[in-house]
Image: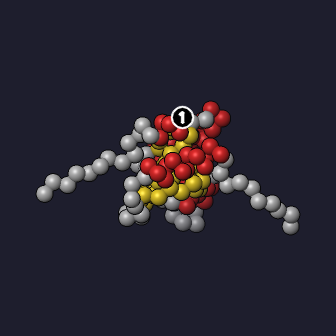
Amino acid sequence: MNIKERSLLSEDETEIYCNLNRLMPEGVVVFVKVKLSEFLTPTAEYGTELFYHDFLELNNLTAPFLLFDVMNKKACKVITFINESKKKTTNELSKILEICQIPLIEVGSIAELYTLNFFEKKLSIK
């Protein structure tokens, strides 16, 4: 078998990943390039043709940057970098995430990451 290693992240993706890690509150981790089928599953009965069809649709889409809440053990947001060539994929991703009530955040630049409020701080009044 002839194989070679390839880069997991482009330079831009690496920079976005590093910046996202700096911006995340404690308990939220950043995962990159996660197939939707890793954290979403079809509601159709397992083994049916509909389940298989929906699974393939989920498996064909990737969350570029997935924010995962460790305490609640669930995906809380997906971040994608706006790119004209990936607009169709982003629209499909948006539709599926909307069904699951997972916000999709589209950013146009790394600087824009610093202008976003990813998580509302909850104040506890005693």
Residue 59: x and y in percent read: 61, 56
At horizontal 62% and vertical 32% (from top left) the residue drawn is 84
**Closer to us: 22 or 70:** 22
Q: Is residue 123 visible?
A: yes
Q: Is residue 50 visible?
A: no
Which image quarter holds the N terminus?
bottom right
Q: Amino acid at mark 1?
A: Gly
The residue depicted at 32 percent of the width and 47 percent of the height is: 120
Q: How is the image coloured?
A: secondary structure
Residue at x-position 26% and y-position 51%: 122
SS state under label 1: loop
The furthest residue to the left:
126
Q: Which one is in front, 33 or 47?
A: 33
Residue farthest along the right direction in this orientation: 2
Residue 29 appears left or right of 82: left
Residue 51 in the image, given as x and y percentages of width and height: 56, 59
The residue that mark 1 highlights is: 108
Q: Crowdedness of circle 1 by 10 Å Cα count: few (<14), some, many (20+)?
A: few
Q: In the image, is 18 to the left or to the right of 3?
A: left
Asked whether 39 or 22 is in front, the reply is: 22
Find residue 32 and report its image quarter: bottom right
Quick check: 1 above or below 12? below
Residue placed most toward the observer, 22 or 106: 22
Q: How many marks?
A: 1
The structure residue drawn at horizontal position 54% and vertical position 43%, both measured from the top left corner, is 80
Quarter of the picture containing the C terminus is: bottom left
- Given the current orientation, which residue lies at the most extreme top position? 84
Which x, y percent locates residue 125? 15, 54
